[in-house]
Each structure stands twice: as C-alpha cells, then as structure tokens.
Amino acid sequence: MNEIFQTLKMYFEYPFVTYALIVGVLIALCSSLLGVTLVLKRFSFIGDGLSHVAFGALAVASVLQLSNKMPMILIITVVCAVILLSTGSEGKMKGDAAIAMISVSALAIGYLLMNVFASSANVSGDVCTTLFGSTSILTLTPNEVWLCVGLSLTVVIIYTLFYNKIFAVTFDEEFAKSAGTKAKSYNLMIAIVIAVIIVLAMNLVGSLLISALVIFPALSTMKVFKSFRAVVISSAVFSVICAALGILISIVYSTPVGATIVAVDLSGFIFFTIYGALRRGVS
C-alpha cells in the first residue's frame, strides 16, 4: 500500500496528472446530474446515440483538417440531440428507434470517412482510440482544461438554476405543461446540455463507453435512495468518486483510462445493488 502512495505522489508532481483528475471529476459530475433525468425519462441510451454522432462529427472534422475540431463536433451533436428528443417525444418514430437509426448511421459514416480519407497509416488504431478512449486525457493542455472547467461550471449552474423545472418535466411532462411550464424549452435545454457533456467525455472514456458515465451513477443510487434530490446528490458523489478512483488506478497500473472508470462504476453498481437488497430484506 505504501508503494502505491509513493507512486501516486511521484505522478502528482507532473501537471498532466492533476489536469486529468480535474477534467475527469468535472465530466463525471456533469454526466451524473443529467443521467438521473435521462434514466427517469426512459431515454438512457441517448448518451450512447449521441456518442456515435460525436464520433461521426469527429471524422468529418478530421477529413476537413480543422485545427480546432471541438466547435464542429459540438454543433453537430447538439443538433442531433434536439432532433432525437423532439422525434422521441412528438414524432411518429419512437425514441429508441430514432436513437438506433441516427447512432448507427453516424458510426458507419464516420468509420467510412476515416478509411476513405485516411490521414494516417494506422486507421484501425485511430478508430479504436476514439471509440474506447486513450491517453489523450493525460495529455491535456491548460487551455483544454480551462475550457472543460468553464463548460462544466456552466452545466452545473444551469442545472442548479432550473432544478425545479427539470424535476417537473422529468416526472410528469403533461402536468408540467398544464401548470404553465414550457416543457419544450426545458427539453431543448436538457438536449443541449447532454450534448455538451458527451463531447467533453469523448477524451475521457471514448465514444462507446460514454453512456456508462450517464446511467451507472443514477441506476446505482436508485437502488438505495428514493427521492429525486437524494438520488441526484448521491449520484453526483458516486460518479465523482468512481471517476477519481478509475483515473488513479489507470495511472498506477497503466490500464486504459475509460475502461477502468467504467469497471469501477460497474463495481459500485454491484455493491449498491447488494446493499439495497440487504437493506430491503432487513426492513
């Protein structure tokens, strides 16, 4: 154990480790906040669908050889998020069908573009890195860290200011409409915020594993807590702890960052499931 602490102490002398931990914790926090709403609205897989869209947008930005890919990825992902939520709630196509269609199409087009307009000799490696995450979280620049901090604080502030409205459209959208709440506007806001989170999380866990950051904290804490506020707070704490542990474990044992974080999330989910079952049995 002492050896592990010595290793961590050595690594924390390097700024890139601190940057990775800050960004990872902030992304995990933001993902958990919106995750509760998406799970309760039975739209959990929107994170998975939008992550595929972000992959396709990244491929387009790479083909165009843009120096800063973030704006294009963010715009495309936000537009698709709005389309998915509006289609799922009002259109003839159900939400899960819309997610499947858009996500599979974006994934296929992105992979096709990366092969046809290959910018490197190792296309398979580039694709794998984008899908499953890479060491890019450990090579963040100060500007990227500040961008993440700014966007994350914006997400937290928006969620805090509009908490009551988000609560209303999450549990009973029809009642919220009848009470005068502009449900469409708040659904649009949720779509934009989750799209921002997806784009931020690509460097952390990769496109295919992003949905884990969104759904695992909510599903885990729902096993123990029942009120919306308790689930939101505990979900945020759970997500932050798992992200920090995952990053630290990956640094010490040289494991993939994204996969390690998801493995820790899964372990937490199993623990909460067992604890919740025992608690109900005792009561």
Image: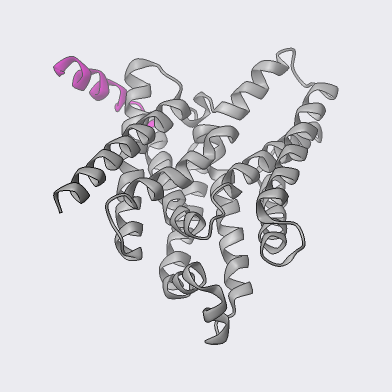
Q: Nearer the viewer, residue 149 or 25?
A: 25
Residue 13 belongs to the span the image colors magenta: yes
Classify 33 as above or below 175. Answer: above
Classify 209 as above or below 134. Answer: below
Q: How is the image coloured?
A: one colour
Instruction: Give the left or right position of residue 250, taking residue 131 as reference.
Output: left
**Residue 192 sits in which quadrant?**
bottom right
Would you say the magenta stretch is mainly helix, strand or loop? helix
Q: Quadrant of the N terminus?
A: top left
Q: Is residue 16 visible?
A: no
- In percent of width and height, residue 53 lies at 69, 42
Residue 225 belongs to the span the image colors magenta: no
Q: Is residue 246 visible?
A: yes
Classify 252 as above or below 41. Answer: above
- In percent of width and height, residue 64 lies at 81, 36
Instruction: Give the left or right position of residue 16, taking residue 10 as reference.
Output: right
- In percent of width and height, residue 263 lies at 39, 28
Q: Nearer the viewer, residue 143 or 213?
A: 213
Q: Which residue is rendered at x = 58% and y = 46% of the image? A: 45
Instruction: Give the left or right position of residue 127, taking residue 260 as reference.
Output: right
Question: How many numbered dots are placed on residues in this image?
Answer: 0
**Residue 226 sits in which quadrant?**
bottom left
Q: Quadrant of the C terminus?
A: bottom left
- Residue most toward the right? 116
Specify start and end residues of the magenta stretch as a single range: 1-16
- Residue most toward the top? 121
- In percent of width and height, residue 99 lies at 68, 48
Q: Which residue is rendered at x = 69% and y = 17% of the image? A: 124
**Residue 262 sits in which quadrant?**
top left
Q: Nearer the viewer, residue 37 or 65?
A: 37
